[in-house]
Image (spheres, helix red, strand yellow):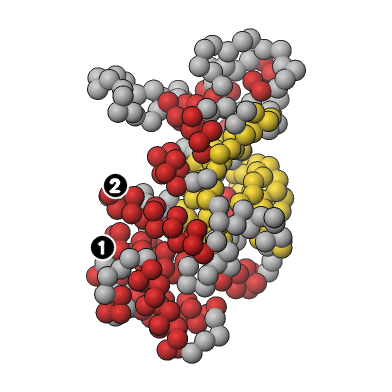
Amino acid sequence: MTPTLSVRNLRVEIPTRHGVLTAIDDLSFDIAPGEVLGVVGESGAGKSITGAAIIGLLEPPGRVAGGEIRLAGERVDNLAPAQMRRLRGRRIGMIFQDPLTSLDPLYRIGDQLVETILTHENIPAAAARDKAERLLNEVGIPAAGQRLASYPHQFSGGMRQRVVIALALAADPALVIADEPTTALDVSVQAQIIALIKRLCRERGAAVMLITHDMGVIAETADRVCVLYAGRLAEIGSVRDVVKRPQHPYTAGLMAAIPSLADDLGARLAQIPGSMPRLDAIPKGCAFHPRCEYAFDRCVAARPPLYRTAAGEAACFLHDPERAAPAPAEGAP
């Protein structure tokens, strides 16, 4: 089966006065039709830049400097800006963190939905309005016919995000990119929005790239998870395997930092020492080695490739079958 989205050896660069910074370095992954791929990592890992590169919305002077991005087998990273604009919305839907950045405060919700539908479909205006009402019903907005006449400020945050989801699905896209879609919402509303995205995309057969820093959202929503660190792929595999049996020390650190109901109330949360490196200070070798308790000489000298593991793939020399390294302590990947 041809993947809905195929990213191969993606490289994103940001030219500066002091040199060229590499924001995404040799990143590859696929998303199948109807699949939800979670993309997770700390702030600065490269999650949102990856999404922006796929939809052709990199902030200048950022640029795709290498690799390929294919949508249903067709290459899209080399399209002219006008072609990419036609592709966005029609074949790729977008759900952003703050719904107010996606909604024009001066226009009624119905007008924005109808305009989006008419931009991508050759149908009468009355049919577009009927579709807009159906979309609002689908995303769970009550009295959808009446709310078409409302302005964005007349909706709560959760309802605005539902409208944004309706906009993203207006042209029945093959791929939906959701960038931190629940960050600004209450926990109870987060669960509703995540369940909504998952249900609607499964029903429509759309692939979903879910970008978040919240492993709880990933565990609840995604089929597979891609863990990024300093613009590089650290680990990829099924959610169940990655959550239960992380194979990269960075992923293991993320999992250990999640609080559990079984933990002692007075116990300190586990944390990964240090912080994500700046783009102009990414270490040689494995970018994670300064923060890794299992690092050895080879980690400093060479960048690890992706190795097959029992739970997917991980870029860690601990999984090299021919490695010569100290045995990791109990609990290591």
Tag 1 or tag 2, which sits nearer the N-term? 1
What x and y, as percent, mark residue 268?
31, 20
Residue 187 — which label?
2
Classify mark 1: residues with Cα within 10 Å, few (<14), some (14-19) or many (20+).
few
Residue 249 — which label?
none
Q: Quadrant of residue 59?
A: bottom right
Of residues 214 and 285, which is closer to you in this image? Answer: 214
Q: Residue at x 50, y 82 (%)?
A: 118
Secondary structure under the numbered disc 1 in the rendered image: loop
Q: CA distance from mark 2 to mark 1?
A: 14 Å
Q: Residue at x 33, y 65 (%)?
A: 140
Q: Is residue 69 left or right of residue 174?
A: right
What x and y, as percent, mark residue 210?
49, 50
The three-letter code of the residue at mark 2 reads Val
Give the number of the mark in front: 2 or 1.
2
Residue at which label 1 appears: 156
The three-letter code of the residue at mark 1 reads Ser
Residue 63 in sight here: no
In the displayed structure, 329 sits above or below 77; it is above
Q: Residue at x 52, y 73 (%)?
A: 171
Classify mark 2: residues with Cα within 10 Å, few (<14), some (14-19) or many (20+).
few
What x and y, as percent, mark residue 306?
68, 33
Of residues 67 and 72, which is closer to you in this image? Answer: 72
Image quadrant occupied by the C terminus? top right
Q: Is residue 205 left or right of residue 301?
A: left
